[in-house]
């Protein structure tokens, strides 16, 4: 037999294999638990962020498009800033509800300022 050597793996190949395994695990977890659940876990792990403007814009867009489901029933998770959390919301960090719920309970959520959409959820 001649002196045979096995094929060497370069460092780049090893890194690509590890990245491929990480992506595969991410995809399996995302498809098995649901992508919304996965995104919530990632943002909660990172500490979440204030999304008042995003929710306000989403509700305004749903109203202008006359989207009954988006405005009246779609549950939106609102992350409040620290100042509003302690002062107005009895220590709550997040509140979940539809745009219509936030309009009806506007006295309980003064920092949210979601405009009503007359005639949409009646």
Image (cartoon, helix red, strand yellow):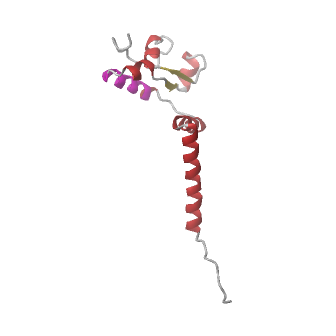
Residue nearer the viewer, 83 or 63: 63
Q: Where is residue 120 in the image (x, y as percent from the top left)?
A: 35, 14
Whether residue 121 is visible: yes
Is residue 46 among the parts visible in the rendering?
Answer: no
Depth check, front residue: 95 or 70: 70
What percent of the width, then of the height, locates residue 89?
56, 17
Specify whether residue 86 is painted magenta. no
Q: Residue at x 59, y 65 (%)?
A: 14
Please state the extent of the stretch shown in magenta in the rendering. Answer: 54-65
Q: Quadrant of residue 18?
A: bottom right
Q: Is residue 36 left or right of residue 5?
A: left
> Which quarter of the rendering shows the C terminus?
top left
Prevailing secondary structure of the magenta residues:
helix
Identify whether 32 is placed above or below 82: below
Task: Work out whether residue 79 or residue 73 is closer to the camera in this orientation and state it.
Answer: 73
x then y, percent, for residue 40: 55, 34
């Amino acid at each position: 037999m001649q002196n045979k050597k096995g094929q060497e793996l370069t460092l780049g190949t090893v890194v690509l294999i590890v990245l491929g395994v990480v992506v595969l695990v991410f995809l399996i977890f995302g498809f098995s638990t649901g992508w919304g659940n996965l995104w919530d876990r990632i943002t909660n792990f990172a500490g979440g962020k204030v999304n008042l403007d995003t929710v306000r814009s989403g509700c305004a867009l749903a109203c202008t498009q006359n989207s009954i489901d988006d405005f009246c029933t779609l549950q939106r998770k609102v992350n409040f800033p620290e100042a509003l959390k302690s002062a107005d919301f009895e220590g709550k960090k997040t509140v979940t509800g539809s745009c219509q719920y936030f309009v009806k309970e506007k006295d309980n959520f003064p920092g949210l300022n979601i405009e009503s959409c007359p005639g949409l959820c009646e």
